[in-house]
Image: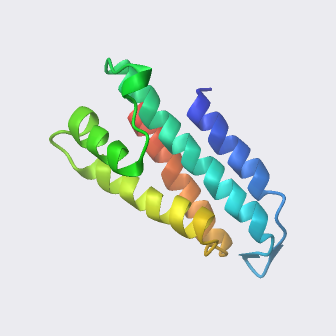
Amino acid sequence: MNEPLRYLNNAKETLGRSPIEENQYTGGKYVKSACGIAYLGVLKAIEDCLLKKGLSKKELPKKVEEYRKAIKKHVSANNGKLLRQFDNLYDELHIAGYYRGMLHSADVVKGVFKTAKAFIRKISS
């Protein structure tokens, strides 16, 4: 298993520590932590892809805008689909899930994790 998917599995383990009542996670700190770990897996997948494309470790992005530019330039130059997926994962995992702690619905969180897994697999192939 590649490292980005290990991040995602660790995120799922963390999420599993949160109790669920009426399809809502009640352990906010676990949901926030899990979303943060899953987002790091997404970033790691992008970095691995960029390294395969010939970028050096020094050239890897440091900020979200740099990740967007790198995806646009090196990964999806003629197809903005991956960039849109990354933008959605940034908004959902990082901002809503980790930063603001706004994700509570088990179905929503599981859906975002499923999207993250699909993104990681797509960019890693």
| Image position, residue 3 (x, y; %) | 60, 29
Residue 49 horizontal side relative to residue 21, left or right: left
Q: Residue at x 80, y 70 (%)?
A: 27
Question: Is 14 drawn above or below residue 104 in the view shown?
Answer: above
Residue at the far left in the pictured view = 78
Residue 27 horizontal side relative to residue 53, left or right: right
* The N terminus, quarter of image: top right
Q: Total label count?
A: 0
Q: Residue at x 40, y 61 (%)?
A: 88
Viewer-closest of 22 and 27: 27
| Image position, residue 12 (x, y; %) | 71, 50
| Image position, residue 90 (x, y; %) | 45, 58
| Image position, residue 80 (x, y; %) | 22, 50
Residue at the far bottom in the pictured view = 22
Viewer-closest of 31 and 110: 31
* The C terminus, quarter of image: top left
Question: Is 42 drawn above or below residue 75 in the view shown?
Answer: below
Residue 125: in sight, yes or no? no
Q: Quadrant of residue 62?
A: top left
